[in-house]
């Protein structure tokens, strides 16, 4: 089980007198094993939404619930994949993946088994003893995803995970994540400002307004994806050419363009 | 500075020229009697005296024996400062409460020069090993603590968040995240500590009653043997330079190693 609920969530940054309102009345229910992407203009507070689920930030009012329980602090049940990877530079790939398992006090044989599985899942077997700086950005992000997956988290939180990657690597990672998510569905909250990425990956896409961020619209992608059978195409460019995909993408673009703060791709 | 950068040969030559001018001026002042030779022995007097002291004892020991005795005290003081300062700094960097408790006291205490502790060091820890070590400790401790603290406090926030997200308990967080991240800062602090500890040596040995370079200087001063006092000063300067050069080398080596690793 892994549901996420935002209920009447406001977030104000700064002092109580002269604060900046970042989020305004966010309401969103994410069901178990659902993949939801949030898109929005820069500074709209989409990352703040994720950080509240992670337990890095507290809501100023309202509730953020995971499986019906209020989030109070960070924990391995809500694994985060950061945009800048956030791997420990002094630990090898293996040690980076192992830390969370050691924190769970799992015995060594069990850890080895899980690490082997995670390395295989992300095609990292030959890099187990490399240090992060010896790997490309794409490989580093694979390590970060493996580190999150190995925890078997209730929810997976991905904060613009492919934002720091070059275009080709990005596409490969998107395709892999789709395969991973369809084969082994779990609850994912995915933050991005890339519209195509959101439509390609998610079951539902939530569009946010500029600051103070509100949820403007939530689109159901999954129904269209299944009726139009997107998953029969293995390459992202083929999916992106489909009329149903183009239609959704254009809709989201137009919706975002209405927001004054919109300037990103 | 303007103009082209100097070659390493030119740098060495300039350094030598400065040294020659210094020794020349010193000799001139002393030989001409502008300053009485009794008060300012010539460089040659000092060098001769130094060679004598290498083999013949003064105040109960030869110069190498005095140096060995000083170095032992110094090593105790600096190692103790590192053993307490670095862990305390890391803990303060992680636990806000401890930071709030310790920082105000520490900020006051660190401005008290090591030599100001001399009377109490002697009273509390005696003139044997304890008192002098405490004075050297007082000199070496602040940089150990400050640098470990800063290193721990300014770890990339993403790494702290990653650690917390992975459910890392406090002790492991300090040992496996804060400490490795703070290593460059800690090493820099240790080098400064080593220098300040050595500078505190003469003050520490004012209260020593057996051996040590500072002790030798105090004894020589009592009998107005200015050349011997100067031998002590020169020895302290040279050993201090040597310590700094060695630690710089070590730091450079560590940085290069980390550059490959991190």
Image: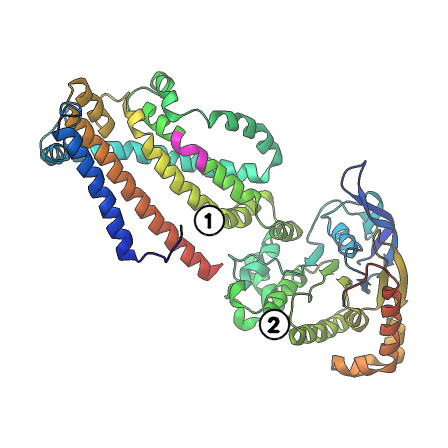
Percent coordinates x, y for residue A156 in the rendering: 73, 60
Q: Main secondary structure of the magenta part?
A: helix
Instruction: Determine the secondary structure under disc 2.
Output: helix
**For mark 2, does the 10 Å Cα neighbourhood hold few (<14), some (14 to 19), or many (20 or more) residues?**
few
The residue closer to the viewer here, B107 or A106, is B107
The residue closer to the viewer here, A76 or A35, is A35
Residue B129 visible in rendering: no
Q: Is residue B46 left or right of residue A213?
A: left
Percent coordinates x, y for residue A37 in the rendering: 80, 64
Q: Which mark is residue A120?
A: 2
Q: Decide: is A124 above or below B11.
A: below
- Determine which quarter of the picture holds residue A2: bottom right
Marks 1 and 2, how far apart in space? 35 Å
Residue B121 within the segment the image draws in magenta: no
Q: Is residue B262 left or right of residue A111?
A: left
Percent coordinates x, y for residue B144 in the rendering: 44, 38
Residue B146 visible in rendering: yes
Query: Which residues are the magenta region?
Result: B139-143
Task: Between label 1 and label 2, give the one nearer the viewer.
Answer: 1
**For mark 1, does the 10 Å Cα neighbourhood hold few (<14), some (14 to 19), or many (20 or more) residues?**
some
- List the residue tagged with mark 1: B184
The residue closer to the viewer here, B35 or A188, is B35
- Tag 1 subunit: B
Residue B142 within the segment the image draws in magenta: yes
- Determine which quarter of the picture holds residue A43: bottom right
């Amino acid at each position: 089980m892994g549901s996420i609920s935002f209920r009447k969530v406001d977030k104000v940054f700064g002092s109580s007198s002269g604060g900046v309102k970042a989020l305004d009345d966010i309401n969103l229910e994410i069901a178990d094993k659902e993949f939801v992407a949030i898109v929005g203009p820069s500074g709209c507070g989409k990352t703040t939404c994720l950080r509240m689920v992670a337990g890095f930030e507290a809501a100023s009012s309202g509730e953020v619930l995971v499986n019906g329980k209020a989030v109070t602090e960070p924990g391995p049940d809500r694994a985060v994949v950061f945009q800048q990877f956030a791997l420990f530079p002094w630990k090898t790939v293996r040690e980076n993946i192992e830390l969370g398992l050691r924190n769970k006090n799992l015995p060594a044989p069990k850890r080895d088994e899980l690490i082997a599985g995670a390395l295989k899942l992300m095609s990292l077997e030959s890099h187990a003893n490399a240090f992060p700086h010896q790997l490309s950005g794409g490989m580093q992000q694979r390590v970060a995803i493996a580190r999150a997956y190995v925890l078997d988290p209730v929810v997976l939180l991905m904060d613009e995970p492919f934002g720091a990657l070059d275009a080709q690597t990005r596409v490969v990672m998107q395709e892999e994540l789709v395969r991973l998510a369809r084969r082994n569905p779990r609850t994912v909250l995915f933050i991005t400002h890339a519209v195509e990425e959101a439509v390609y990956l998610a079951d539902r896409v939530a569009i946010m307004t500029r600051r103070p961020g509100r949820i403007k619209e939530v689109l159901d992608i999954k129904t269209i994806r299944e009726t139009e059978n997107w998953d029969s195409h293995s390459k992202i460019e083929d999916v992106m050419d489909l009329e149903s995909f183009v239609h959704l993408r254009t809709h989201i673009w137009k919706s975002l363009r209405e927001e004054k703060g919109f300037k990103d791709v | 500075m303007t103009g082209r950068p100097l070659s390493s040969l030119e740098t060495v030559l300039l350094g030598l020229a400065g040294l020659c001018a210094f020794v020349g001026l010193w000799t001139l002042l002393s030989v001409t009697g502008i300053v009485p030779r009794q008060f300012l022995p010539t460089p040659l007097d000092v060098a001769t005296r130094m060679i004598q002291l290498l083999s013949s004892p003064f105040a109960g020991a030869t110069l190498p024996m005095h140096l060995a005795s000083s170095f032992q005290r110094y090593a105790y003081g600096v190692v103790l400062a590192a053993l307490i300062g670095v862990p305390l700094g890391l803990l303060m960097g992680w636990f806000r409460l401890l930071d709030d408790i310790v920082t105000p006291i520490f900020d006051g205490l660190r401005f008290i020069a090591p030599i100001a502790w001399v009377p109490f060091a002697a009273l509390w820890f005696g003139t044997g090993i304890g008192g002098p070590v405490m004075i050297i400790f007082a000199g070496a401790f602040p940089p150990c603590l400050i640098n470990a603290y800063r290193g721990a406090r300014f770890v990339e926030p993403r790494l702290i968040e990653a650690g917390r997200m992975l459910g890392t308990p406090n002790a492991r967080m300090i040992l496996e995240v804060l400490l490795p991240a703070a290593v460059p800062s800690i090493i820099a602090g240790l080098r400064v500590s080593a220098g300040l500890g050595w500078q505190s040596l003469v003050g520490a040995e004012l209260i020593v009653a057996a051996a040590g370079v500072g002790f030798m200087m105090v004894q020589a001063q009592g009998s107005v043997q200015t050349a011997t006092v100067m031998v002590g000063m020169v020895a302290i300067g040279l050993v201090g330079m040597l310590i700094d050069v060695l630690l710089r080398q070590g730091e450079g080596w560590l940085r290069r190693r980390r550059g490959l690793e991190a």
